[in-house]
Amino acid sequence: ERLETIEAGAFLCCERLQRIAIPLKRGLIVYDSVYHDYTQFDYCEQLATVDLIGGVYKTVASLHMKSWRTEMTAEINRINQVLSNTPSDEKTNVIRQWMDSVMDKMDHYKAEHCRHV
């Protein structure tokens, strides 16, 4: 949960990596200025599961509307449905885009929640 960044290439080509547990945090995945891309989990062919750690599930549970909670849960779980079929050279970008999507939806629903409370 205290993890601030995952540096470029941190797990690049880690053939046995199957699962990661990371906090949901903007800027966690750092741009690789050498490869001009995000490379942390590229070529980790077996990587199929991302677990989010921290308070994200508590935040989802506290959302006002059941439909918001359902949509957020589905979005959080989406990565584990697509990652095993993602080409290994695209895994980092898929994870990063998914994280951005989850955080954007979370920000939207938290703002909506504040308007209803």
Image: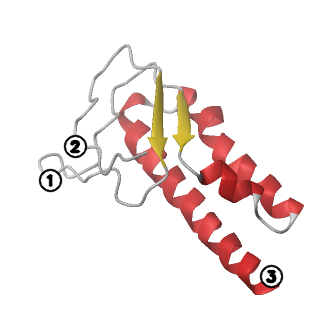
Is the C-beta separation of discs 3 and 1 under 8 Å?
Answer: no
Q: Residue at x 65, y 34 (%)?
A: 81
Residue type of the residue flagged with mark 3: Val
**Local SS, label 1:** loop
Q: Which residue is drawn at 31% across and 51% down?
A: 4
**Residue receiving disc 3:** 117
**Residue receiving disc 1:** 33
Is 6 located above or below residue 115 in the figure?
Answer: above
Q: Report, in whole angstroms, how far the alpha carbon at label 2 lies from the one at label 3.
A: 41 Å
Q: Which of marks 2 and 3 is nearer the N terminus?
A: 2
**Local SS, label 3:** loop
Is 49 located above or below residue 66 in the figure?
Answer: above
Is the C-beta separation of discs 1 and 2 under 8 Å?
Answer: yes
4 left or right, relative to 76: left
Q: Which residue is drawn at 50% across and 59% down?
A: 100
Farthest residue, direction left? 34
For the residue carrying disc 3, how many other residues have a C-alpha within 10 Å: few (<14), some (14-19), or many (20+)? Answer: few
Q: Report, in whole angstroms, how far the alpha carbon at label 3 lies from the one at label 1.
A: 44 Å
Q: Which residue is drawn at 59% across and 57% down?
A: 102
- Quarter of the figure that contains the C terminus: bottom right
